Amino acid sequence: MTVTPLPVPWEGTRQLFDLEKVLASIDTMAAQRPVAAQIVSVANSDDTSAKELSRILASDVALASRVMKLANSAYFGMRGRVTSLQFAVTVVGFTTVRTMATVALTDLDDESRLPEDFWDVTTSLALASSALAPRFGERPQDALCLGLLAQMGAALLNHNDREGYAELVDDNPDFTARRTAELRRYGINSVRLTAVALEQWGFPHGMTSRLNQVDDLTSREGGLLRSAFEVAARLTVEDYDTVPIVRLSCGQLREDDLVPVIDQVRADADELRRAMLA
């Protein structure tokens, strides 16, 4: 197993985090969800067909049900018309199925093990990323997956330091400040941890590089996710001090561009959450 080196912790950092141990714990989770783990492994292969992927997926009834529900959601515009699992896999795409399997095998579907605001933020991130994707030359479905997985690292930090991480979240409702606090406490922030885990599982560089660039304000590559985090903050953080979107997006967006996006996220968030957690 190749693990990307951690950044050097700030002086005085309390070392509460062992990356090797956390990644090993993911492997343990995967062993408990073998179908989801198999999907994560094969969905990126050029040799895998929709028929083969749906056959594997059918072995996990709960996960198959979620894929069917998502395929029939308003997001894909196929409400009620997707009646077979193979068609559902074709509609949502292999990357989305792989993303949903990753959610399952890392226990992101168990809200009792997650930070309190996890899925409110995640659905906002996913839908905002998807809606804004064309402005950054990205495919909306790929951006949806980026948003759905961006907070996986936060869940892993919470799994391994529940009381400490809950306190950190309470003290840092702003997501940028939260990532700074995570780095100080653990030597790595949650979005970077997501990237490390996805790199280990062979997710495409196009996804992990966007995660790695989120805090570089000069990086257009990280602009989509930065902008999505801003939308999520405006929707979920009380008394949030907004940051100019033109700065976060490297000039790709203006404030007026966010109005329909925020309305769309509000309209579709509950349905996406139900599909992911059903």
Image (tube, rainbow, N blue to C red):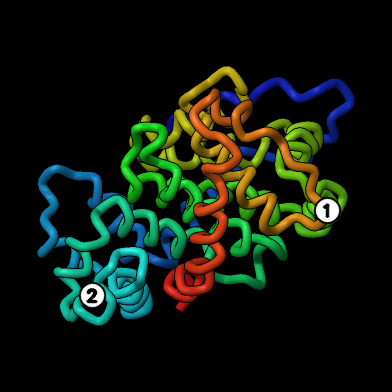
Q: Residue at x 19, y 44 (%)?
A: 45
Q: Residue at x 49, y 60 (%)?
A: 264
Amino acid bearing label 1:
Asp
What SS does tag 1 mark? Answer: loop
Q: Residue beneath label 1, please?
A: 239
Point out residue 199 in the picture as x, y percentages from the top left corner.
42, 35
Point out residue 190 in the picture as x, y percentages from the top left corner.
64, 42
Camera sees residue 26: no
Point out residue 114 in the picture as x, y percentages from the top left corner.
66, 63
Q: Residue at x 53, y 46 (%)?
A: 150
Callouts 2 and 1 close, C-beta under 8 Å:
no
Q: Which mark is residue 122?
A: none
* Viewer-nearest residue: 116 or 45: 116
* Viewer-nearest residue: 4 or 103: 103
Question: For residue 163, what is the image quadrant?
Answer: bottom right
* Viewer-nearest residue: 278 or 243: 243
Q: Earlier in the sequence, mark 2 or mark 1?
A: 2
Q: Which mark is residue 58?
A: 2
Considering only vertical position in the picture, is 164 above or below 178? below
Point out residue 136 in the picture as x, y percentages from the top left corner.
41, 32
Amino acid bearing label 2:
Ala
Considering only vertical position in the picture, is 18 above or below 205? below
